[in-house]
Image (cartoon, helix red, strand yellow):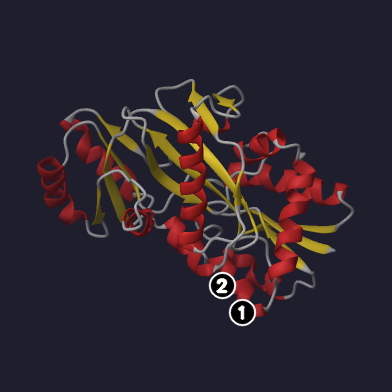
Amino acid sequence: MKIAVLYGGTSGEREVSLSTGKGIIQALKNKGHDVVGIDFSPEKISEILKLDVDMVFIGLHGRFGEDGRIQGLLDMVGLPYVGSGVLASALAMDKAKSKQIFSSNGILTARSESYDVTKRETFDSIQKHIEATFNLPFVIKPNQEGSTLGLTIVKEASQIRKGIETAAQSDSTILVEEYIGGREVTVPVVGQKGKEQALPVIEIIPKNDYYDFDSKYKPGGSEHIVPAHLDLSLTERLKEEAVLAHQLLGCEVYSRVDFIINENNEPIILEVNTLPGMTPTSLFPDSAQEVGWSYDDLIQKFVELSSSHK
């Protein structure tokens, strides 16, 4: 097939997307496809409108890639693409909205509040509300940024204002949620709509205090344990809830669902990533390897699943 790969982008996750794109392009070539790579930015929309390809593989992360906008553009011009559509992408990106959907369907989430931070003069009252509502420690983060960018773990009241300001630089809405300590795990989900399966659960052991940007993307920043050493019933629950979360948002083809296992051994969902990192050392390919799929096979599988339903 002739496939265009969109990568790079303009979000805070550009660097990661560059290596995701490189990996996908190489894998598609290895599988015999004719590949066009586009380092995408909104100024290049005319290039997308002129594309003459069978399919688009979106290797973007964060804003303009993962939030449904590029999917809407491709839908309008009738170009099939790999992965979730407009609504699922937008919902998954909006942490506050997706959490409402999860908790109303019985998936445990951390208690949280969202705040509109478009006007600086409201920061004082937001700070007061946060102080009255949350016990330390808690997390302040942008509602729609990925890769823990703009995130602050607030351990002392003196950090609240800075946390609001940092998160507000990345988004017009911020999310404050209780901090849940515990084991970090993630579950890749793949398959046709209604027939999705969860791949082996991965435990992430960060070298830093928590799984931040460096832990995610720097070599040796974290250790991945696949499959995670968890008892069978917890493993099954994580897999079931990951598939359910994927389906509740209406995701397609693949996603990766992040959880924290709290001190009571319960999974608390963090978020669904509709375009998880796909560098050859990323979490999703790591898990796929456990069931015998090479990186190239995995990318090919996404293409086949997308061809069969779009």
**Label 1 secondary element:** helix
Q: Is residue 8 left or right of residue 96?
A: right
The amino acid type of the residue labelled 1 equals Met
Question: Who's the residue at 50% across and 35% down the image?
Answer: 235
Work out whether 265 lies above or below 70. above
Tags 2 and 1 in contact by the CB under 8 Å rule? yes
Q: In which quarter of the image is the N terminus?
A: bottom right
Comparing 280 with 4, the one in front is: 280
| Vertical order, 133 against 85 (above or below) | above
Q: Please, what is the three-letter code of the amino acid marked with disc 2?
A: Gly
Give the left or right position of residue 259, taking residue 75 as reference.
left
Please give the name of the residue rendered at 82% of the width and 57% of the height, measured from the top-left corner. 35
What label sits on residue 76 in the rendered view?
A: 1
* Horizontal and vertical percent position of residue 37: 76, 56
Q: What element carries label 2?
A: helix
The residue lying furthest to the right in this view is 32
